[in-house]
Image (cartoon, rainbow, N blue to C red):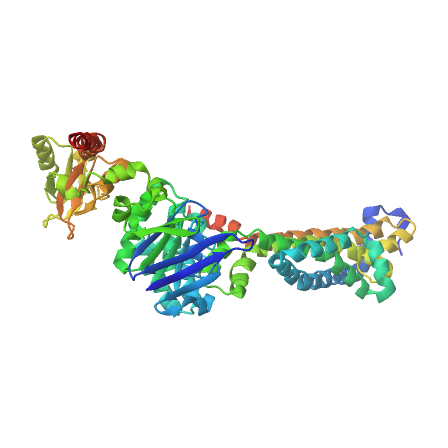
Amino acid sequence: MQDMSQMSTTEQFFYYMQENGLYVFSQFLDHFLISIYGVLLAALIGIPLGILISKYSKLSGVVITLANIIQTIPALALMAILMLVLGLGKTTVIVTVFFYSLLPIIKNTYVGIKNINKSITDAGRGMGMTKAQVLYMVELPLSLSVIITGIRIALVVAIGITAIGAFIGAGGLGDIIIRGTNATDGTAIIIAGALPTALMAILSDVLLGLIERKLDPVKRQQKRINQVI
Amino acid sequence: MLKIENLTKVYRGGKVAVDQLNLDINQGEFIAFIGTSGSGKTTALRMINRMVEPTSGKMTLNDKDITKMNPVTLRRSIGYVIQQIGLMPHMTIRDNITLVPHLLKWSKEKKDETARRLIELVNLPPSYLDYYPAQLSGGQQQRIGVLRALAANQDIILMDEPFGALDPITRDTLQDLIKDIQQRLNKTVIFVTHDMDEAIKLADRIAIMHEGKLIQFDTPDNILANPANDFVKEFIGSHRLIQQKPNIKTVDEVMIKPISITIEKSLDEAIRLMVEKRVDTLFVTDGDNRLQGYLDVESFTGARKTKKSVSECYEKDIFYVKTGSKLQDSVRRILKRNLKNIPVVDEEHRLVGLVTRANIVDIVYDTIWGEEEETVQNKKELMSE
């Protein structure tokens, strides 16, 4: 056993990672999955809801206001309220993430579809597309990159919320951070929890950004134009 | 072919957009709906493919009641071109052209073949099929928009101010193109416009609309000769009425004999001919006197050292009119495109004459002095009575 107090914070950090690498990795995975489940669930509900309110604009005000209100509740407070109903554990955190992801996903789907040039959908209808065909041949392909942006924002926020989820016993990297705050001289442990969290957020942001650019019909074309020239 | 009876559209709030419209349109006709904005012409057009549901009235297309058809099936059988073009930005030109065939579930080979055949119809290279709409200019995009309306062999094509957003020269080219396609493929076209020149140039019959009502439905010549009321008169514009008055002349009456040279002659011969005849432009023809292009002084400069024969340096891009076309139209074309002159060809594309800028002078003279002489004569007659 080495004398920890003789080591610098960096050395302590590497020592911790060496000893507990597998544990950090499993918490990393837990953390990631909790965030992903919440966001996927929100996408499953939010995208159809966004499409719906883009068609029936009377609903859009109500739905977006509701999602906005949820967004104003502090994460910890929302989690505490949900805990009263759902108890401790991962489920509560996933549901919290779900609620927080709804707004960006609904809003981006709505905006993505609303911003499509009216003449394009009009032409599609005029060519004899059914409503469903207009949706999946025109509206969805053209708004896909905007929808992905919504998911990207939601996922980054979700990773932050999941870190707080450790308070109600959901596990994840937040667990390591809390342990660090409780320990004397726990800086290295805090870093061991915080650094992977930040890394996860940045990586998922970059990755989804790449996907988003790939799916943007306009940007994709510019690339092709460059090739032609 | 298309019969419209008592077609009426009342919007919510009681605004009557189209009021008791009656039209009978034959196969192969080019019809223009014209009117000021808010006259209901676009609404009338959009009711034909039921983009707007009519409030009352009856429409039959080849004896089938349009209002009882499934709107989706109906729209797939009617071509539709809109002013905003509305190409799908995420699809290639090929997919855009064959959008309706795709909806009708044609085989891939048939779609590809159609796309290749059609793109040549509008003078674009087949390589454009793999491009995206954003890579094309506005005029090229609208050519694709027109093709999209032809791809599934639709007999009837609706056009809603298709060239409204294009510059005058592109518009002129596309007008020629669409008229040519319409005649060649014998399509029925219904065309909405607010440009009287466009309507006169293209349409077989013009329907003038005002405040939802049909004011006059007749051939351009008849409308110009006998406008139904003051509104029509004002709408046509007095300058067109005057233009039309000096008996409608055709190019055949005024054209002069052009100086032409056959394609296999040498440049030296061409220059000698120019000097001899005192002209700056020679029309290049083949052995059968068919028009191939032209050769003017500018083509010589520089080219004489390297090129020896006419075939190497004549200009192939040439605008021409057919015999029997109206003088006004030809003159308008000379002015619009800033040409020095315009050759006249017969049905077999043989060079038969030439209309020059001097003819413009004649027309201006006619409209200014011819009119006055007439009124002076009228006055004299009145006085003698």
Question: Is B334 in front, or is A182?
Answer: B334
Q: Residue furthest front?
A: B385
Kindly indicate the quadrant of the structure image that contains residue A214.
Answer: bottom right
| Figure disc tally | 0
Question: Is B6 in front, or is A225?
Answer: B6
**Residue drawn at point x = 36 percent, y = 53 percent:** B191
**Residue drawn at point x = 11 percent, y = 40 percent:** B260
Determine whether, in the image, residue B347 is placed left or right of residue B96. left
Q: Is residue B163 above or below residue B366?
A: below
Q: Is residue B60 above or below residue B194?
A: below
Q: Residue furthest right?
A: A184
Residue B89 placed where, x, y %? 48, 53
Kindly indicate the quadrant of the structure image that contains residue A96.
Answer: bottom right
Report the quarter where the N terminus of chain B lies. Answer: bottom left
Confirm whether residue A60 shows in the render: yes
**Residue drawn at point x = 39 percent, y = 60 percent:** B79
Determine whether, in the image, residue A157 is placed left or right of residue A170. left
Confirm whether residue B311 shows in the render: no
Question: Is A126 in front, or is A172?
Answer: A126
Report the quarter where the C terminus of chain B lies. Answer: top left
Determine whether, in the image, residue A218 is placed left or right of residue B330. right
Determine whether, in the image, residue B148 is placed left or right of residue A136. left
Residue A218 placed where, x, y %? 51, 50
Residue A131 placed where, x, y %? 53, 64
Residue B208 placed where, x, y %? 36, 49
